[in-house]
Image (tube, rainbow, N blue to C red):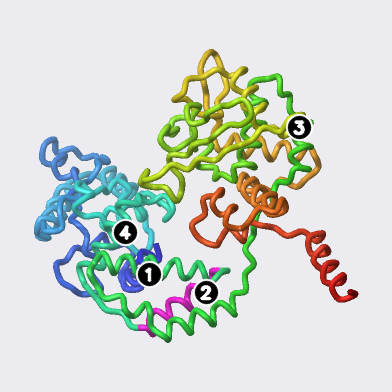
Amino acid sequence: MIFLRIYANVKNKSLKKKSSKVPLQYSDSDSDDSIHVPKVKSAKAKKFKKSGSSRVTKHKSRVISESSDSSDYDSFESSTDDDTSSTSGTDSSCKKKSLKKRKVKSGMVAKASDDVQNPQTWPHTTLQYEYINKSVSFQDLDLKLFVAGELEIIGSKPFDIDSELLCTYSEFLSRSFRSAQSIRNYLNGVKVLFLLLGLHVDVFSSYELKLTMKGLDRKLKHLPKQAFPITLEILGKIREHLNLNTPLDATYWCLFLFALLLLSRKSNLVPVSTKKFDKNKQLCRGDVTVFPSLIIVAFKWTKTIQLGNRILRIPLLAYPLSKFCPVNAYKRMCSLNPCTSDDAAFSYKKKGKCIPITYNQFQNKLRELLCKIGLNPNLFSSHSFRRGGATLASKAGVSPSSIQLMGDWKSNCYTKYIVSSLSDKINVAEQIKDFVLK
């Protein structure tokens, strides 16, 4: 996206020198003052030749190709001038009205009806017309066309960059970004583009760039915002506002327990929408094996299991006479919501159909219940269950390697999920005190 903005700014500076009332100029030269876009061929010429009508009508113009001869466009302008010169005063007024409807944006003059006939052939041109004529924001642009357009721009004129340019680019990004890690992500995106084009990427490992990023780390001191963990105390208060005899609340309660005790990611438990439910990714009823005193949950796909080369199996034991028993919660949910083995694990019955709980429903229900118990819902998210599960396991004395295994972490980032409370630190201070006083 930054490439597109920089490219647009360069073009704007050159185009501001021209009059805003002059239509798009098309040239095959390599000068910076010309816009290399396909030729605009309006359907008005055909209308004038066939009917000789004196009224100027609106027709959707088509952009044919960039290799078209510019003389056709000039001849079209002259023929249009000859036709319109023979019209009455009403015709000239209509023409003035049509000219007023032309949109001017980014220094380029074009009609709102301009379009590109072959967008895949000219992706960057399509992006230009979408942004200029239709007032499309950068966020709404087609991602595939955006990538193809950037490759078209860079690939047409290969260039090399040095460490000084990358350092300047990093400093420019630091004016609007709050974290140096975001700048690293942008630099990595540029590096990927260079790899796709077969260009050298040694400059991204230069010592000057490393020093610049260290300086930006000091300049942009940023504390990441992390969701608060869900504790057993919070979960117990949430349970008081649920009616476990209803199919929907029973499903939500089972989902909350599984998210906490399995340390699972939300992508493994619930789909984004009902239509995007994938039985090969999300948990299904057939993936949960029920025994008298335990259940075994099998994950076929996770963030770290992309190729299906292994299955992650996690057991959950029964907690007799406890309101946090996952086995009883799952059995209650299945009895109130009978579904097939291919249906989503956390589904509820509605008009005889099994409907899976989506991520938005999961998030909204959690925030609704947090408001009822007097907590700020903005401090929590569905990820709070994963953080709460890791913290709960650490307090229970589970070894770090076991926490990493159960939470399916590949790196040591699981240590960031464990939240140490003030009471834990007081216990450490008391142990040191007892050792000193011996």
The residues colored magenta run 163-177
Instruction: Give the residue pinned by disc 1.
Output: 6
Q: Secondary structure at mark 2?
A: loop
- For discs 2 and 4, the disc positioned in front in the rendered view: 2
Instruction: Give the residue pinned by disc 4.
Output: 109
Q: Residues within 10 Å of mark 3 (few under 14, many from 20)?
A: few
Mark closest to the chain's N terminus, 4 or 1:
1
Percent x, y for residue 193? 31, 65
Q: Amino acid at mark 1?
A: Ile
Vertical placement of 308 versus 191: above or below? above
Percent x, y for residue 363? 62, 40
Instruction: Give the residue pinned by disc 2.
Output: 174
Image quadrant in which you'd find residue 15: bottom left
Check if residue 170 falls in the magenta segment.
yes
Q: Amino acid at mark 4?
A: Val
Check if residue 139 falls in the magenta segment.
no
Asked whether, in this view, residue 47 is left or right of residue 362, the answer is left
Kindly report the distance in space between the C-alpha atoms of the residues bearing marks 2 and 4: 34 Å
